[in-house]
Image (cartoon, grey):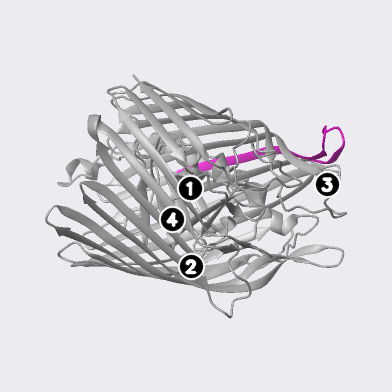
Amino acid sequence: MRKILLTLVIIYSCNLLATEPDSLKTHPEPKYILEGASITAEKPTQAIGKIDIKIIDDRTINSATNMADVVTDLPGINISKGGKSGSDLSIRGFAKEDVMIMIDGRPIGGGYFDAVDLSTLPVSEIKEIQVIKGPASALYGSNTMGGVVNIVSAAPDNSTWLKGVLQIQRNNTNRFQLSSSHKFTNWDYLLSFARYNTIGFPLSEDFVPVTLENGGIRDHSAQRQYDLQGRLNYDFSDLHRVGLSASYTWMDEKQIPVATNEFYNPSYPSDIFRKFVDWKRYQFSMQNDLQMDWNKTLNMNLYFDGYDDIYHTYRQPDDTDLDLNSRLLSYNFGTINKFTLKMNNYDLIAGYRAEYQSFNRKDNDEYKDWTSNWQLLQNPFCQMEFRLNKFTLSAGSGFSIFHQNHRNNWIYHLEPSAGLFYESERFAQYNLAVSNNVNYPGLHELFSSSSGNPDLKEESAWKYEISTLQPFTAGSLAGNLNVAVFYNAIENLVEKVYYTQSSQYENIDQVNSYGLEAAFKCKFLWEYVIQYRYLQYTKDSDRPLYENPQNIVNITEKVMLPYDIFFVYEASWHDISHSEDEILPSYWLNNFYLNKSFSHFKIKLGIENVFDQNYQEKYGYPQPGRDIILTLEASI
């Protein structure tokens, strides 16, 4: 591992000293200036299937305090909140452990539990969200079975130096952010500090108090989070850019709400409560974009993610009687290197990705001494795009190599992908895509002392998708219809199996799912968007898609009122969904927002869950009732 790290550092250092190639000085069509030090999706080369892009506009980000709030209205995505894991992201029925979360094209480590809690990722200087829900190209590597969410940062401009944001909600819930950013001739920077605080969210007046929840403010939902972020990009020339980014997030205490349906049992008494103490996440990455020739580029990315937290279980009224006091440290260190060759009729992208994952754990129960384990994932990949008139064919494959310290053998897997794209003379688009994507077991599934199974196989899915985008105009009416039909055949799904005295993770499930997504957008006097998602599993599947509604509808209307006041109405309907032993009822949510912008000042007012709907996204976890949000933003 040390040799690999030393080699990469030497390569990066050499690139820093690289000069402009002679071929760039003489070629009649030199490459344009590099726009950013990132590896992000392009259409259709990297996103062989359908890609949804949500542009982040100040008018439409009204109450989002974290990334879970930002992506919740995208079709095909379902967010459920509650319990130890915070927010659970599901894309087309895949669990959050199967989804790759990226920032500017580099993966975010999921830590010991192999999943990123989007509710802990702050909303700060974001340009757009790219979501790949169907077949994923080989360029992303393994662990993309459930899709890819790429968070793209906004580049600083040369007109702003300082920005402050204050957001106020009910129950002493507030968010404060202060950031400084600016673009100079050949470099730019961003520094940001944010604080989020809540004593707990309000419940609906229709919520019926139960033994473990008295209503009003949700018990054990208090949280205080701090975020520090920094980015620096420097252009050595028009053809060479280096970027550095770092972030640090911490919470002195994060309470974990208990399920309102808890009942007493000897293994987990209902008077035991849980919380995180001294929760930390720290990240660092270095990007290097080099124009090697007029048609050749090299992108390199080194990244490190670390997690550190203490998990307590305790009894009320005080926490002196600790049933469990566990400390967990986990680390991800990785690199992505990508070479791109662009020709008249085809593009070639090839590269290599590697990620080393490890953890250390100690507690007063099963890990009385520090316990460590690790695993290594490698992905060489190659993707080609051929263009012929209105047709574009993208095809390639990744080759994943997986190893962990309890196995003598290495695991190999081929992950092919292909997509056919067509654009008509009237700008209608048609796309057909297929891929085989793999998800390797996480550290917890492999090495947990209570349920781990070091002999687990990798999960895999063949994913198929047909999509079309149909623009239209009729007088002053303009819009488009976007439809996708998909089918997923998933094998070796990992599930925890309970025995008389123990439990263990096993490869036992096979699920075949299918569905449809449709989005209709038009503009006539006001903007109108309606999105629909249908999701179902076949009868021969081993289990249903828990906590995933069969039908979801999202409606958004936007209109400019007098005095340049921007009005947004959002409504969403979620069909019934199944947990392991219960059915969650369907529900409607309605939100209203008003935004007013001045030259250097913005004010936003919103009412969420206007009709105080009492609903659950996860069984036993009631969600917020009516909430009022006031946001003030100033910049100089």
Looking at the rendered structure, which numbered label has been put on residue 535? 2
Tell me which label, 2 or 4, sits earlier in the chain.
Answer: 4
CA gap, disc 2 to disc 4? 35 Å
Nearer the observer, 507 or 582: 582
Looking at the rendered structure, which numbered label has been put on residue 367? 3
Label 3 crowding class (10 Å Cα cut-off): few <14, some 14-19, many 20+? some
The quadrant where residue 255 appears:
top right
Tell me which label, 4 or 3, sits earlier in the chain.
Answer: 4
Residues in magenta, as a range: 301-325
CA gap, disc 1 to disc 4? 17 Å
CA gap, disc 2 to disc 1? 25 Å
Amino acid under disc 3: Tyr
Tell me which label, 1 or 3, sits earlier in the chain.
Answer: 1
CA gap, disc 1 to disc 3? 32 Å
In the rendered view, does 632 fall on the left or right side of 302? Answer: left
* Numbered disc 3: secondary structure: loop
* Numbered disc 4: secondary structure: strand
Determine the main secondary structure of the stretch shown in magenta.
strand
Q: Which residue is mark 4?
A: 351
